[in-house]
Image (cartoon, rainbow, N blue to C red):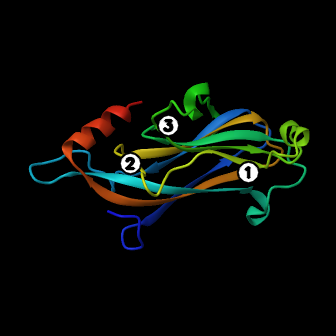
Amino acid sequence: MAYNIKDVFYLSTSATIAAATANGGSAQLDLSAYIDPIARGRTKGTGLAIYKVHVGIQRSADNSSPIDDTESGTFSYGLLAGAGFGDLATGALQVADTGYQMTNSLLIDSGQFYGPKSQVANASNTVSMYNSVLTSSTEVPYVVVRDNVCLTYQVHDNMVAATTLSVRLECAQISLDQATLNQLLRTQTV
């Protein structure tokens, strides 16, 4: 499959980051309808190629208004292949320090958010409210062979207002030969 209008489709999910609550949470996106990691005879296995991840961060109240200029909260987020956390509210998940590092082979996309009134944003004129850390590629997409991806987040400074973190994935089903499939299954182990 190629990155073109004929093959690419969208999947999306979102999580609400509760106000005044520490730790993290997740929203799980079920991919089982798009993935078949078992090659049978002449039939190849199928994976889901993720070419791009679009991220949205908005206030949950007031019809998804922009982040208020009084927001002082900060958080990191990541899209993880096969994590299997399920849907967890803010405070129910503690994402490991290594969860959003480049050494995590399950990490598809990640970034950081700094509220306009956070210490980081106030200390530097060069920090924007949103910093992308890792993003996928249209030339070499991240291929998921597990039955889910989880949008996870870890709150560092509690949010003043409830915030919606959402992602839209540009993806396509692709056929995989047995060697590639085996290699992806080994690297996407939790």
SS class, disc 2:
strand
Q: Amino acid at mark 3?
A: Phe
Q: Quadrant of the N terminus?
A: bottom left
Q: Report the Cα–Cα distance between label 1 and label 2.
A: 29 Å
Q: Report the Cα–Cα distance between label 3 and label 1.
A: 20 Å
Outermost residue to the left = 41
Locate residue 49, reporting x and y percent: 39, 54
Instruction: Specify whether 168 is left or right of 183.
Output: right
Q: Which residue is mark 2?
A: 143
* Number of residues whose C-alpha sits closer than 10 Å to that of mark 3, classed few (under 14), some (14–19) or many (20 or more): some
SS class, disc 1:
strand
Q: Which residue is mark 1?
A: 163
Please name whichever residue, 22 or 165, is drawn nearer the observer in this view of the structure: 165
Please name whichever residue, 179 or 115, is drawn nearer the observer in this view of the structure: 179
Q: Residue at x 86, y 40 (%)?
A: 118
Q: Residue at x 26, y 45 (%)?
A: 37
Q: Amino acid at mark 1?
A: Thr
Q: Is residue 28 visible?
A: yes
Labelled pair 3, 1 in contact (Cβ < 8 Å): no
Of pointers 3 and 1, the one earlier in the residue sequence = 3
Q: Which residue is mark 3?
A: 85
Q: Amino acid at mark 2?
A: Val
